[in-house]
């Protein structure tokens, strides 16, 4: 993780490119790379505060701030009116966790250790919660498609619909309620829950029980990291359209593939690292727990946050996004159902991610 700190030089380069070079491509590239170490520092500061506050409060901190970088980036994009980019990045975050990171973790762990075993109950709970989140996206999407057919409107173009707005608010509230219930369940039965584990490298904490940073230092790093992420997100979002035109890439592809990876690299490295140490329960808790947090907390929260910007974000997604997400969650659940994994199952998930990525590239 410390190696990522060398990438902090790109934070300076991003500011230079934004204010002096005025090159959208350089701004986009430097901002993407700069977000990687800053997001890592934000996660590290959260973990340090969690060590000071104890397991229950610490678990709550990680369960609410584990995807803080992703949340900041999407709020900035939402403020800029790039709703499609926000929705694509939410779908991409979930796909990246259940296919790319889980697949890479199973592959690396399987190559090194052969067949690895983990708690079927924990994996089953996470799989059920992810299926619930897919239902929360499917219902508003199919509702709006049927509603458009009835009114004779274009299917894939989102038009003002008060019924969809109300349905999205109800579904978002229900998903947040279920996520809160999952936190309560995790705190009461930690051996069966995954939410408090999100973003915490317990493998590393076994080596040093005492926190390395004081509360003041941790809070300062958290505050500064948040501020820097806000600036870099502004740069990134502002450069999206010029980069799309020059590179010939769609907004959906950037949102699904690139932006989620940028905001979660540090957490992804922890998941793969713990799998290589044969700690599959922790690795699954990170990848599946992060997916749950995005689907059941971040996405619904953005529906409510969007009300502050004058245009409500609904839970109507591109049908291709929803289908890709549903199939990905299905195959990830199939892999986890027997409580053991191997490198071939990891490779299968990686291949699915490549196929899905190709679909979004040519969409």
Image (spheres, helix red, strand yellow):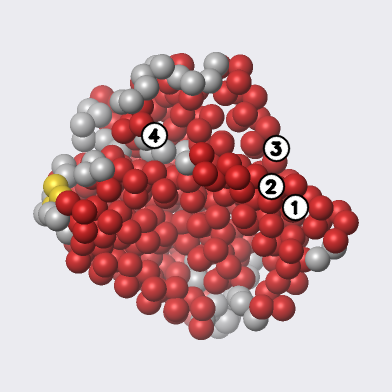
Residue furthest to the right:
20
The tag earlier along the polypeptide, 4 or 3, is 4
Tag 3 residue: 227
| Image x and y of residue 324, in percent | 38, 70
| Real-space Cα separation, disc 2 to disc 4, in angstroms | 26 Å
| Real-space Cα separation, disc 2 to disc 3, in angstroms | 16 Å
| Real-space Cα separation, disc 2 to disc 1, in angstroms | 6 Å
Neighbor class of circle 3 (other Cα within 10 Å; few <14, some 14-19, many 20+) is some
The tag earlier along the polypeptide, 2 or 3, is 2
Q: With 154 as the anchor, is 10 left or right in this view?
A: right
Residue at left offset 14%, top offset 55%: 114
The tag earlier along the polypeptide, 3 or 1, is 1
Residue 9: which numbered mark, if any? 2
Tag 1 residue: 13
State the count of labels: 4
| Real-space Cα separation, disc 4 to disc 3, in angstroms | 22 Å
Neighbor class of circle 2 (other Cα within 10 Å; few <14, some 14-19, many 20+) is few
| Real-space Cα separation, disc 1 to disc 4, in angstroms | 30 Å
Residue 200: which numbered mark, if any? 4
Residue 152: which numbered mark, if any? none
| Image x and y of residue 203, in percent | 31, 33
Judged by depth in the image, the label closer to the viewer, 2 or 4, is 2
Q: Tell me if label 2 and label 3 are in contact, CB under 8 Å.
A: no
């Amino acid at each position: 993780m410390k190696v990522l700190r060398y990438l902090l030089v790109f934070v300076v380069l991003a500011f230079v490119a934004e204010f002096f070079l005025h090159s959208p491509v350089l701004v986009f590239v430097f901002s993407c790379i700069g977000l990687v170490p800053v997001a890592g520092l934000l996660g590290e500061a959260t973990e340090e505060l969690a060590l000071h506050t104890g397991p229950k409060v610490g678990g709550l901190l990680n369960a609410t701030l584990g995807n803080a970088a992703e949340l900041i980036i999407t709020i900035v994009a939402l403020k800029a009116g790039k709703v499609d980019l926000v929705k694509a990045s939410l779908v991409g975050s979930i796909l990246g966790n259940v296919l790319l990171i889980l697949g890479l973790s199973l592959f690396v762990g399987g190559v090194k250790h052969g067949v690895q075993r983990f708690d079927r109950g924990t994996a089953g709970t996470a799989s059920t919660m992810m299926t619930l989140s897919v239902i929360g996206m499917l219902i508003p999407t199919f509702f709006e498609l049927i509603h458009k057919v009835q009114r004779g409107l274009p299917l894939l173009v989102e038009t003002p619909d008060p019924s969809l707005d109300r349905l999205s608010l109800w579904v978002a509230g229900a998903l947040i309620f279920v996520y809160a219930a999952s936190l309560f369940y995790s705190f009461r039965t930690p051996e069966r829950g995954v939410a408090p584990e999100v973003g915490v490298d317990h493998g590393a904490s076994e080596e040093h029980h005492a926190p390395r940073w004081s509360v003041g230092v941790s809070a300062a790093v958290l505050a500064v990291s948040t501020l820097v992420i806000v600036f870099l997100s502004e740069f990134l979002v502002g450069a999206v359209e010029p980069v799309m035109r020059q590179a010939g890439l769609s907004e959906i592809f950037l949102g699904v593939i690139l932006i989620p990876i940028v905001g979660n690299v540090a957490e992804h490295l922890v998941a793969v690292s713990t799998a290589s140490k044969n700690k599959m329960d922790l690795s699954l808790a990170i990848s599946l727990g992060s997916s749950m947090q995005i689907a059941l907390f971040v996405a619904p929260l953005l529906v409510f946050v969007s009300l502050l910007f004058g245009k409500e974000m609904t839970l109507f997604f591109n049908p291709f996004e929803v289908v890709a997400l549903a199939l990905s969650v299905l195959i990830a659940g199939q892999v986890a159902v027997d409580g053991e994994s191997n490198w071939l199952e990891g490779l299968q998930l990686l291949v699915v991610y490549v196929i899905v990525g190709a679909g979004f590239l040519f969409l």
